[in-house]
Image (spheres, grey):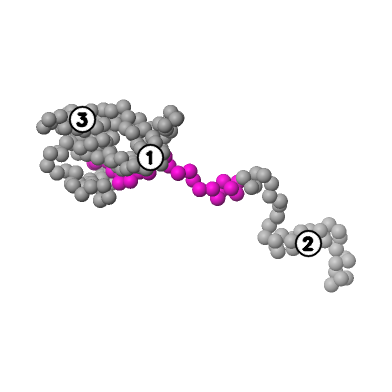
Amino acid sequence: MSRSIRLLSPVALAALALSLSLSLGGGIAHAAGPSDTASKQAMSAPAPAPWVQVDSAWVRPMVKGQTATGGFMVLTARQPLTLEGFSMTRAGVPELHEMSMDGNVMRMRAIASLALPAGQAVMLRPGGHHLLLTQLPDALKEGALLSLTLKLRTAEGKSVTQAINVPVKTLTMLPAASASAPMGGAGNQHQHGMAH
C-alpha cells in the first residue's frame, strides 16, 4: 500500500485526503461567525406573542340579498389596548358597533373604539359589541374563511395591527366559558342585513 501512495502525485494525494474527510465529516465544516450565531438564535427564538388572544371567532353567514353581517369573538389583550376598528381583505365597509336597549327598543350604533383591559376577556357578541361588515357585494357563505386585521392602539399611543382569519359559520350559542344563554333567544332577533 505504501508503494501505491508513493506513485500518487501530491495533487492526487490532496484530493484523496479531501474526499475522505468530506465523506467522514459529512460536509465542509466552518467556524461559526456572528451571522451564524444570529441566524441560529432567530431560528430557535419563539415567535412574538400576538397582541390579543382571539377565541371563539366567527362571522354569521349571509342570505341572498343581504349586504351586511356581524363578526363575533372573545378578545383578551396581554397589555392594555384599545380596539380602534378593523379592516378586511374583501370589498365592503368594516365598522365597530354596539347594541344597547333604549327603553324597549334595541339600538345599534357605530363606536370609535373599545377598551381591551389587560388579561380581561372582552366579548364581541350579538346584542352587544360586535364587528359589522356592511356593503358587501357578495354574500359570505357558510364554510368560508374571512381575513381581518384588528387595528389596535397601545396605552403609549402606538398603533399596531393583528391579522386574524375568521370562519363563516352559523352559531346559536355563546362560548361555553362566557355564558350559557342562547344568542338567538327572545328579544335578540337582530339581523345585520336589516336597516338600522
Q: Quick check: can you spot residue 25?
A: yes
Q: How many other residues sit within 10 Å of disc 1, few (<14), some (14-19) or many (≥20)?
A: few
Which numbered mark, 3 or 2, is in the foreground of this view?
3
Is residue 15 positioned above or below 78 on the image? below
x then y, percent, for residue 21: 74, 61
Image point 43% across, 42% down: which residue?
50
Q: Quick check: can you spot residue 194?
A: no
Image point 39% across, 36% down: which residue?
80
Q: Amino acid at mark 2?
A: Leu
Screen quadrant of the C terminus: top left
Q: How many other residues sit within 10 Å of disc 3, few (<14), some (14-19) or many (≥20)?
A: some
Is residue 58 positioned above or below 153 on the image? below
Membership of 45 in magenta stretch: yes
Q: Secondary structure at mark 2?
A: helix
Q: Secondary structure at mark 1?
A: loop
Label 3 to label 2: alpha-carbon separation: 81 Å
Membership of 58 in magenta stretch: yes
Q: Amino acid at mark 1?
A: Ala
The numbered mark, 2 or 1, whose residue comes first in the sequence reads: 2
Q: Amino acid at mark 3?
A: Met
x then y, percent, for residue 43: 56, 48
Marking on residue 108: 3
x then y, percent, for residue 134: 26, 31
Residue identifier under label 2: 16
Q: Which residues are magenta?
A: 39-62
The numbered mark, 3 or 1, whose residue comes first in the sequence reads: 3
Is residue 118 positioned above or below 153 on the image? below
Which numbered mark, 3 or 1, is in the foreground of this view?
1
Q: Are marks 3 and 2 in contact (CB under 8 Å)?
A: no
Residue identifier under label 1: 118
Image point 15% across, 39% down: which residue?
188
**Left or right: 57, with 153 as reference point:** left
